[in-house]
Amino acid sequence: MITGKDYLREIQKFTTSQYLNSGLRITAGVMVPLLVLVKAGWLSVGIPFLWGALFVSLTDTPGPIHHRRNGMLAAIAVNMIVVFITGFTKEYQLLLVIQIVVAGFLLAMSGIYGARAGAVGSLALVIMLLNLLTTREEQHTFKDSLLIAAGGTWYMMLSLLLYRLRPYRLVEQGLGENLMAIADYVRARASFYKENPNLSDCFNRVMEEQSVVQKTQEQIQEVLFKTRKFVADASPKSRSMMMIYLDALDLFEQTMYAYQDYENLHRTLAHTNLLTGFYGLILELAAGLEHIGISVQTGVPVKKDLDLTVRIDTLRQQVSSQQNHADAADELLSLHALEKTLDNIQNIVNRINKLVLYTRMEVDDEAPAELAQQVSNQAVTQPINLQIFLENLTLSSNTFRHAVRLTAGMIMAYVVAITFALTHTYWVLLTIVTIMKPVYAETRRRSIQRMAGTLVGVLLVLAILYFISANSVLLVIMILSMLIGYSMLRVNYFIFVVFLTIFVVISFHFLNPLTFKTLIVERLVDTIIGGAIGAAASRFVFPVWGHDEIHASMVKMLKANRNYFSSAWSAVKQNNVETPLYEAARKEAVVALTNLSQNFQHMLSEPQQAQESAAIHQFVIANHMLTSHIAALSTDKLLTNHTADADPDKLSEAIVHELEQAEAHIQDHFTGYDQGPSQHLSLTNQTLNQLSMIHALARDIRKITLKL
């Protein structure tokens, strides 16, 4: 049940977020010139100006300021060129079809150069369709091109001015979002301790939240380490933000340390109230971290430290008391695991309180030079050159397949629109462009959200227009709809479509009150047609299936975990885990795990799932646990916690061997199990520690791969 306090917290998170900030910037960039044009009576002439501002604003995604500036300049240039060419081809159907094919393919291929370049290409395609297939009363090719460029330039100047006024704002919002994503991940981890949990659902939730954390980390990493101001600036503010990011990386890793055999935990301790206490404690930990995230996002220092001492001490006493009365070996092992979890929670609390000091700028730490440089080197961008384009002209490139698929979808949509004499051909094609994504699962989700959002938006706007006739009130609703819609663009596509539909329909009502109801029906029909064609193209034209990609992701996961374990074991033996090699291996493993989880989720939403879905699910969960236990190596006293018959070095060799064999199974190179180091180990008397847990997981993973 969501309480009033929870609602207030969610409102605070949104109102201080980069998403609302982006929505405000886009709305101001479009509505200010719109109101000026309406006041001056130049609206019909100035529509290209508004298009130019809107479609450049949508490419202004978070990132280093010079990347944002270059992206907007590229968008202005490409939009102007596209509109200029369109002015000469739109009168000739053959040239029009050729332009749809050539421009559609080339602009869709821009995604090979990164997300920002992909956005520039996609939005240039949208503006091409708007000019290619619409007819306005006042059109002039050269003038429209200049107005498109002028609108884009106006928005770029506004965006750069706002950045100069508050240069740290985007970083604060990104850091806060990252901390809140980690808090949500911790909440997902807490669900393992709930009474009678569905462990499979818990793991799925953890994997989803981990993907979100990874996304926010990559975004803020690029902003921090590719912006000269934060790399060169020695001010306390910039240093504190740098340290918050670096400590948040370590904090996230530390939240992965205490993975347990949760099924055994609930089986052996169900008669106690311990797990409920741990559930409440971890939720309180997540709430404290979220509070810090909101404060960082708002740009204010945290006033109070996180103090969980009483709760931790109480639980520690309860665990100790239970140990004194426990006889079963399994129960003692579970209680020992809870002890380690409490130690880890205390360490996390200490690290969180260090973040609190950074928000107050009370700690004047310098970022470790090697670590900062190593993280900086990871924030790379895709260079734009012809060779990369040529290398992707193959069906092995997902971007190439998407470009062909998108072009085919647009041609199908154009043929349908011409055959059935649809009034607004561009609405069908625009639906195709906006919903089709490189992966089938994403296109399917977008298609459903687009059609549902349009229907809900139409119903809401009809109710609004039925009860409200005052133009001043409708204008306010239109502006608010645009603000909410574009604020939700990167958060919830369904809500974005709902409010965009309200904005568009009210706009048509102002432009032509007599025919807007007909336009509503046509928009619904065209959206349904476009959604159906987009789904069909994604399904049958060079589709990219998750179940075809999953095995490659599994091999990458095994290689990453094997490399991560080797680096972690070497670092622990040297008593130094803060090495560039270890950090790089950790990063590689987390990224591989995130990609594997996302690919598996895509696979589950596909019409043709792999026959071994259950085994793959087990594989994903086992690797999730394996990565977490490898992360916990640095906290375990490996070199002293073993018996004579289980040498740690031999055990580490066995772990590597198991992962190599698992990889061989997947790659179909397996010819018979090679009796390597594992057969020489007797684990029956081994003291339970992270190394033996890792070996057991590696062995389980090998067995799972035999089922594939």
Image (cartoon, rainbow, N blue to C red):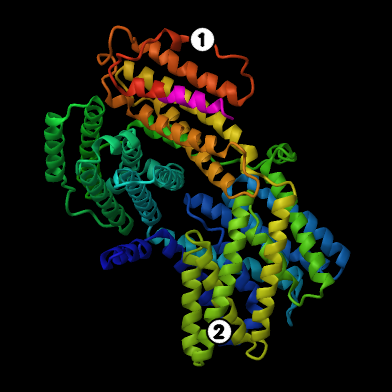
Q: Amino acid at mark 1?
A: Gln
> Of helix, strand and loop, which mostly describes the magenta segment?
helix
Q: Secondary structure at mark 2?
A: helix
Quick one: label 1, few (<14), some, or many (20+) residues within 10 Å?
few
Q: Count every numbered label the image shows and give the total.
A: 2
Q: Is the residue 540 above or below the residue 532 in the image? A: above
Tag in front: 2 or 1: 1
Q: Looking at the image, which residue is at 49% across and 28% down?
A: 560
- Looking at the image, residue 303 sits to the left or right of residue 73; the answer is left
Q: Is the residue 557 above or below the residue 501 in the image? A: above
**Nearer to us in this view, 82 or 692:** 692
- Looking at the image, residue 201 sits to the left or right of residue 523; the answer is left
Location of the C terminus by quadrant is top right
Q: Position of residue 352 (x, y in %)?
A: 24, 43
Location of the N terminus by quadrant is bottom left
The region drawn magenta spans 697-708
Q: Amino acid at mark 2?
A: Leu
- Looking at the image, residue 525 sits to the left or right of residue 686; the answer is right
Q: In the rendering, which numbered label is found on residue 675?
A: 1
Q: From where the camera sits, is residue 468 visible? A: no
Q: In the rendering, which numbered label is found on residue 462?
A: 2
For marks 2 and 1, the one nearer the N-term is 2
Q: Secondary structure at mark 1?
A: loop
**Nearer to us in this view, 622 or 249:** 622
Q: From where the camera sits, is residue 22 visible? A: yes
Q: In the rendering, which numbered label is found on residue 687?
A: none
- 3D distance between C-alphas at marks 2 and 1: 72 Å
Q: Position of residue 111 (x, y in %)?
A: 64, 48
Location of residue 690 (image quadrant):
top left
Q: Looking at the image, which residue is at 63% across and 60% down?
A: 435
Q: Looking at the image, which residue is at 72% across and 61% down?
A: 533
Q: Position of residue 216 (x, y in %)?
A: 43, 48
